[in-house]
Image (cartoon, rainbow, N blue to C red):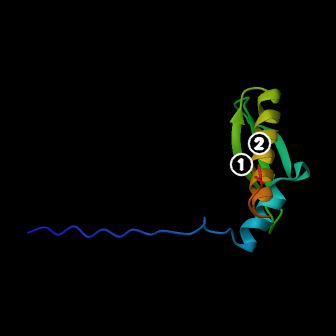
Amino acid sequence: MTFLYTRTNTWNSAPQPTEETIKYWKHISQKKNWRIVQLPNGFLQTEYKSIDSDDWIDVTRRETIDGAKQAIDASIEHYAKKLEFTKGPKVIKTFE
C-alpha cells in the first residue's frame, strides 16, 4: 500500500529578504563592482566583486563587448528593481 503525503504552505505576503540579501543586492546594483575580462578563447566574461573578499565571481559570457555591457546593465537594473520593492508595495492607483 502506498501513501501520498502532501503539505501546502500559504503566506499572507511574499517572504521578506534578509538583511544579508539586501546587502548583496545593494552591492551588485552598483556598476563600480563589475568588470569585463577577456578569456583565452576570445569570449568576454562579466564578473562582479565579492562583498567579503577581493575575489571576482563570473556571471555571463558574451561574444562582444556590447553584449557584455548590456548583460551588466540588465543585471544592475534587475537588482535595483528588487531593492525598490524592499521599501514596500508601490501604489499604482487610488480611488475616491
Q: Is residue 55 visible?
A: no
Q: In the image, is residue 24 above or below residue 29? A: below
Foreground residue among 87 and 61: 87
The residue under the point 70% across, 72% down is: 18
Residue furthest to the bottom in view is 19
Foreground residue among 4 and 57: 4
Q: What label sits on residue 46 in the rendered view?
A: 2
> For numbered disc 1, what is the local secondary structure?
strand
Alpha-carbon span between mark 1 and mark 2 = 6 Å
Q: Position of residue 83 (x, y in %)?
A: 79, 58
Residues at badges 1 and 2 in contact (C-beta under 8 Å)?
A: yes
Q: What label sits on residue 58 in the rendered view?
A: 1
Q: Position of residue 56 (x, y in %)?
A: 78, 55
Q: Toward which corner of the image does residue 69 lie, by quadrant?
A: top right
Disc 1 crowd, CA 10 A, few/some/many (<14, 14-19, 20+):
some
Q: Position of residue 16 (x, y in %)?
A: 66, 69
The residue under the point 53% across, 69% down is: 11
Amino acid type, callout 1: Asp
The residue under the point 82% across, 27% down is: 66
Q: Toward which corner of the image does residue 67 lie, by quadrant?
A: top right
Amino acid type, callout 2: Thr
> For numbered disc 2, what is the local secondary structure?
strand
Q: Position of residue 87 (x, y in %)?
A: 80, 64
Q: Is residue 39 left or right of residue 8?
A: right
